[in-house]
Amino acid sequence: MSALGIDYGGTHTKLLLVDEGGAVLSRETVPTGTLAELGASVRRFLETASVAAQSFAVTVAGTLDPSTGVVRRSANLPWLDGVAPAEVLSELLGIPGVAVQDGEAGAIAEARFGAGRGSDEVFVIVLGTGIAGAHVLSGSVQRGAHGGAGEVGHVPVADNGVTCSCGQVGCLETAIGGQQVGLRWRDRGAENQDASAQDVVAAAASGDEAAVAVLDDAARALGRAILNVSALVDPALIVVGGGVSRSPEWTVEPAVAYARENATFHVVPELRLASLGVWAGAHGAAAVAADTFVGARAQAHRP
Ligand SMILES: [Zn+2]
C-alpha cells in the first residue's frame, strides 16, 4: 500500500509518495494550477514513479469544514472556496482521498517524524506571516469541540497596545508575526515602510536600537505564550517553525530564556526548532492518507 501526500501551496505544489512503512518512494514539485491541472500533474507523477497510489490527502491553505471536506475560504487559491477538493481529485484520479488543513498537516509531520519524533504530546508553533499552533497528541491534532483549538497567535501576551486582525489587543501575532515585526519597527521610527522580519533582524545585528527593542518585545511575547501553553496544555515538547524562527538567537532562544526566568508553577518543556522544512506539509498529508484509508499509522515514516 502506498499513500500520496499533496501539499497544494500558493505557487508550488509538492507531491510525495510513501510506502506502507512510510519510506519515501518518490517526490516532485509542480507549479500550482487548478484542480484539473493538479489531477493531470498527479497522473504524470504516478506514471513516472511507476507505483500506484492507494489513497491521497491534499492540504488546504485556508479554512476547511473537517466533516464535509468543503473549503470555506482560501485566500491564495480562491477557486477552492465552496469546493471539496479531495472529492474532485478523487474522481480525477480514481482513488479515495481526504482534505487536511495545511497547518494541521505540517504539525502532524513535525510532531511524528520531525523535531517532535519520540514525544507523544507535542505543541507546534509556526511563526509565519500569521501564527499557527497545534496540540498534537499521539500523532493527531486536537482540534477542540468547535475546531478552534491551538490559536496561540491570538493569545494576548504583548504590551504594545496594537489591535490585532482578530479584534483583540496585544495578541502574540502583533508582536512576532512576520509582517508585524516590520510594522513594530516602523512604529519605533524606522524609515523602512515595508520591512520584513529578516530586515529587522539584520538591522538589530548591526546595532539598530529600535530593531533590538522590537525583537526584545517579540521574544518576551513569545516567552509569555510559551508559559501560557505550558499552563494550559503542559506538553512534553514545543516545536517552533516558520520564517521568523530562522533567526532563533533573536527570537526563540531569548523567548525560552524569558519563559524559564518567569515560570512559577509552570513546567517549561524542552523547545526544539522544526526540522522538516518545506516538505512537512506533504509528509503530514501522506500520513493522514495512510491513517484514513489504511487505518495503520506510518510508524516507520522516514522523511
Ligand atoms: Zn489576534
Image: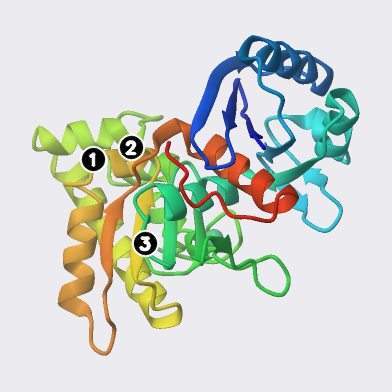
**Residue located at (56% from left, 44% from top):** 284
Which of the 4 quarters of the picture holds residue 167? bottom right
* Mark before the other along the chain sequence, 1 or 2: 2
Question: Any atom of ligand 1 within 8 Å of the CB at mark 3?
Answer: no
Does 175 sit above or below residue 34?
A: below
- Residue 197's disc number: 2
* Mark before the other along the chain sequence, 2 or 3: 3
- The CA span between labels 2 and 3 is 17 Å
Q: Amino acid at mark 2?
A: Ala
Looking at the picture, tell me which residue is in the foreground, 139 or 133: 139
Disc 3: CA contacts within 10 A as few (<14), some (14-19) or many (>=20): some
Q: Secondary structure at mark 2?
A: helix
**Residue located at (35% from left, 62% from top):** 238
Residue contact between numbered discs 2 and 3, judged by CB atoms under 8 Å: no
Does 58 sit above or below residue 256?
A: above
- Quadrant location of the N terminus? top right
Residue contact between numbered discs 1 and 2, judged by CB atoms under 8 Å: yes
Let me know if residue 159 appears in the view.
no
Q: Secondary structure at mark 1?
A: loop
Looking at the picture, tell me which residue is in the foreground, 244 or 294: 294
Residue identified by numbered label 1: 247
* Mark before the other along the chain sequence, 3 or 1: 3
- The CA span between labels 1 and 2 is 9 Å
**Coloured how?**
rainbow
Seen as rendered, the residue at the extreme left is 207
- Residue 160's disc number: 3
Q: Amino acid at mark 3?
A: Asn
